[in-house]
Image: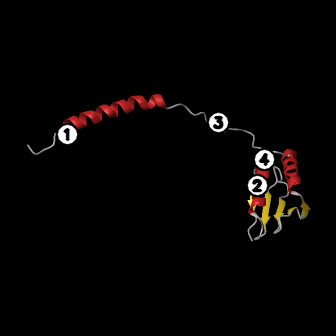
Amino acid sequence: MSDINVTPLVDVLLVLLIIFMVTAPIASYPIEVNLPQRSTQPPPLSEPPPPIRLRIGASGEVFWNDSPYPLSAIGNMMRSEVERDPTNQPQLEIDTNDDADYGILAKVLALAKNADMKKIGFVEK
Protein backbone atom coordinates (compact mmCIF):
# COMPACT_ATOMS: atom_id res chain seq x y z
CA MET A 1 0.00 0.00 0.00
CA SER A 2 1.59 3.24 -1.14
CA ASP A 3 -0.98 5.77 0.25
CA ILE A 4 -0.45 7.53 3.58
CA ASN A 5 -3.24 7.11 6.09
CA VAL A 6 -4.09 10.68 7.24
CA THR A 7 -7.09 9.74 9.39
CA PRO A 8 -5.10 9.68 12.68
CA LEU A 9 -3.54 13.05 11.81
CA VAL A 10 -6.95 14.60 11.17
CA ASP A 11 -8.25 13.16 14.44
CA VAL A 12 -5.37 14.71 16.39
CA LEU A 13 -5.82 18.07 14.69
CA LEU A 14 -9.55 18.12 15.44
CA VAL A 15 -8.90 17.32 19.10
CA LEU A 16 -6.31 20.14 19.27
CA LEU A 17 -8.76 22.52 17.60
CA ILE A 18 -11.44 21.71 20.15
CA ILE A 19 -8.97 22.19 23.03
CA PHE A 20 -7.94 25.62 21.70
CA MET A 21 -11.56 26.64 21.16
CA VAL A 22 -12.41 25.75 24.76
CA THR A 23 -9.38 27.38 26.39
CA ALA A 24 -9.27 30.60 24.32
CA PRO A 25 -12.29 32.32 25.96
CA ILE A 26 -10.87 31.54 29.41
CA ALA A 27 -7.58 33.29 28.60
CA SER A 28 -9.26 36.50 27.45
CA TYR A 29 -10.19 39.30 29.82
CA PRO A 30 -12.44 42.32 29.34
CA ILE A 31 -11.00 45.73 28.56
CA GLU A 32 -12.83 48.73 29.94
CA VAL A 33 -13.25 51.54 27.43
CA ASN A 34 -14.62 54.93 28.44
CA LEU A 35 -16.71 56.02 25.49
CA PRO A 36 -17.77 59.65 25.14
CA GLN A 37 -21.27 60.30 26.36
CA ARG A 38 -23.88 62.15 24.36
CA SER A 39 -24.33 65.73 25.46
CA THR A 40 -27.24 68.02 24.73
CA GLN A 41 -25.17 71.16 25.33
CA PRO A 42 -22.16 71.78 23.09
CA PRO A 43 -18.96 72.88 24.81
CA PRO A 44 -18.43 76.62 24.90
CA LEU A 45 -16.34 77.92 22.05
CA SER A 46 -13.37 79.88 23.28
CA GLU A 47 -10.75 81.76 21.38
CA PRO A 48 -7.42 79.90 21.43
CA PRO A 49 -4.58 81.80 23.08
CA PRO A 50 -1.79 83.11 20.86
CA PRO A 51 0.87 80.52 20.04
CA ILE A 52 4.20 80.41 21.83
CA ARG A 53 7.14 80.77 19.45
CA LEU A 54 10.09 78.82 20.84
CA ARG A 55 13.30 79.15 18.82
CA ILE A 56 16.50 77.19 19.37
CA GLY A 57 19.61 78.90 18.04
CA ALA A 58 22.76 77.38 16.61
CA SER A 59 24.76 77.87 19.80
CA GLY A 60 22.07 76.35 22.04
CA GLU A 61 20.29 79.51 23.19
CA VAL A 62 16.51 79.21 23.62
CA PHE A 63 14.17 82.09 22.73
CA TRP A 64 10.62 82.26 24.13
CA ASN A 65 8.65 84.66 21.90
CA ASP A 66 11.93 86.23 20.69
CA SER A 67 13.25 86.78 24.24
CA PRO A 68 16.26 84.70 25.35
CA TYR A 69 15.77 82.52 28.45
CA PRO A 70 17.89 79.83 30.08
CA LEU A 71 16.74 76.28 29.46
CA SER A 72 16.09 75.79 33.18
CA ALA A 73 13.40 78.51 33.14
CA ILE A 74 11.56 77.17 30.08
CA GLY A 75 9.99 74.26 31.99
CA ASN A 76 8.45 76.57 34.60
CA MET A 77 7.15 78.87 31.88
CA MET A 78 5.52 75.95 30.06
CA ARG A 79 3.96 74.71 33.30
CA SER A 80 2.51 78.16 34.06
CA GLU A 81 1.00 78.36 30.55
CA VAL A 82 -0.67 74.97 31.00
CA GLU A 83 -1.95 75.84 34.48
CA ARG A 84 -3.53 79.03 33.16
CA ASP A 85 -6.17 77.00 31.27
CA PRO A 86 -5.49 73.25 30.84
CA THR A 87 -8.41 72.79 28.43
CA ASN A 88 -7.40 75.68 26.13
CA GLN A 89 -3.63 75.55 25.87
CA PRO A 90 -1.58 77.65 23.48
CA GLN A 91 0.26 75.88 20.68
CA LEU A 92 4.00 75.57 21.16
CA GLU A 93 5.67 76.32 17.80
CA ILE A 94 9.26 75.05 17.86
CA ASP A 95 11.70 76.49 15.35
CA THR A 96 15.26 75.23 15.27
CA ASN A 97 18.34 76.42 13.49
CA ASP A 98 19.80 73.90 11.06
CA ASP A 99 23.01 73.82 13.11
CA ALA A 100 21.26 73.49 16.50
CA ASP A 101 22.20 70.69 18.86
CA TYR A 102 19.63 67.89 18.88
CA GLY A 103 20.17 67.43 22.62
CA ILE A 104 18.70 70.87 23.32
CA LEU A 105 15.62 70.02 21.23
CA ALA A 106 15.24 66.71 23.09
CA LYS A 107 15.40 68.56 26.43
CA VAL A 108 12.79 71.09 25.26
CA LEU A 109 10.47 68.28 24.15
CA ALA A 110 10.96 66.50 27.49
CA LEU A 111 10.14 69.74 29.34
CA ALA A 112 6.98 70.14 27.23
CA LYS A 113 5.93 66.56 27.97
CA ASN A 114 6.57 67.02 31.69
CA ALA A 115 4.55 70.26 31.64
CA ASP A 116 1.68 68.30 30.00
CA MET A 117 1.57 70.48 26.88
CA LYS A 118 -0.78 68.94 24.32
CA LYS A 119 -0.32 71.17 21.26
CA ILE A 120 3.24 71.01 19.96
CA GLY A 121 4.19 71.85 16.40
CA PHE A 122 7.36 72.38 14.40
CA VAL A 123 7.88 75.37 12.13
CA GLU A 124 8.74 74.42 8.58
CA LYS A 125 11.25 76.55 6.79
Residue where numbered disc 1 is placed: 6
Determine the secondary structure under disc 4.
helix
Callout 3, which amino acid?
Answer: Asn
Determine the secondary structure under disc 3.
loop
Give residue 16's quadrant in the image: top left
Q: Residue 4 at what x, y percent from top left?
A: 15, 43
Mark 4 or mark 3: name the one nearer the start of the chain. 3
Mark 1 or mark 4: name the one nearer the start of the chain. 1
Determine the secondary structure under disc 2.
helix
Mark 3 to mark 1: distance in Å?
Answer: 50 Å
Residue where numbered disc 3 is placed: 34
Give residue 67's quadrant in the image: bottom right
Mark 2 to mark 3: distance in Å?
Answer: 29 Å
* Mark identifier at residue 109: 2
Callout 4, which amino acid?
Answer: Asn
Residue where numbered disc 4 is placed: 114
